Image (cartoon, rainbow, N blue to C red):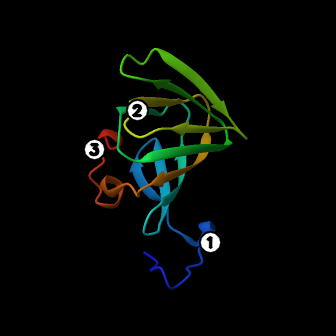
């Protein structure tokens, strides 16, 4: 984690991917107040319904994710390469990879459950 007085440089290709499940891998960069994640999802990967205090921006670089939003999951949106979804704090959501997908997620504040490997909903 970088302190406020020093800059840190990262190269995605030199960072090891964390295997979260058979269907999902990721790389994380964390600052004091935000987290940047590269998330690799295989076609058919399901991210189960969950919510978190963290505000989330999901930017799809390759592929597509279908999101279901809200308590009743009634709102559905497909986010394709080149598109961004902003998920406000505490909004329940789930996602399904419609194809092999690479997304970049930004969280503020950082996802402590991801850092502590306590994100059991992803590891099933």
Q: Which residue is mark 2?
A: 91
Left or right, residue 66 beside residue 91: right
Q: Which residue is mark 1?
A: 11
Q: Is residue 119 above or below residue 109?
A: above
Q: Are marks 3 and 2 in contact (CB under 8 Å)?
A: no
Q: Secondary structure at mark 3?
A: helix
Q: Secondary structure at mark 2?
A: loop
Q: CA distance from mark 1 to mark 3?
A: 28 Å
Query: Which of the marked residues, 1 or 2, is nearer the chain's N terminus?
Result: 1
Q: CA distance from mark 3 to mark 2?
A: 19 Å
Q: Nearest the camera: 27 or 112?
A: 112
Left or right, residue 2 beside residue 72: right
* Image quadrant containing the N terminus: bottom left
Query: Which of the marked residues, 3 or 2, is nearer the chain's N terminus?
Result: 2
Q: Is residue 86 above or below residue 69?
A: below
Residue occupying the point 66% across, 37% down: 63
Residue 91: percent from the left, percent from the top?
40, 32
Q: Which residue is mark 3?
A: 120
Q: Are marks 1 and 3 in contact (CB under 8 Å)?
A: no
Q: Are marks 1 and 2 in contact (CB under 8 Å)?
A: no
């Amino acid at each position: 984690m970088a302190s406020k007085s020093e800059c840190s440089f990262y190269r995605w290709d030199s960072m090891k991917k964390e295997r979260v499940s058979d269907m999902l891998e990721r790389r994380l960069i964390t600052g004091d107040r935000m987290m940047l994640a590269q998330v690799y999802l295989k076609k058919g990967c399901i991210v189960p319904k969950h919510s978190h205090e963290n505000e989330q921006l999901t930017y799809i670089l390759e592929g597509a994710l279908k999101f279901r939003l809200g308590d009743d999951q009634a709102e559905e949106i497909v986010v394709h390469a080149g598109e961004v979804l902003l998920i406000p704090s505490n909004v329940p959501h789930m996602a399904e990879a419609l194809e092999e997908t690479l997304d970049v997620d930004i969280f503020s504040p950082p996802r402590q459950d991801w850092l502590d490997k306590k994100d059991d909903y992803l590891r099933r």
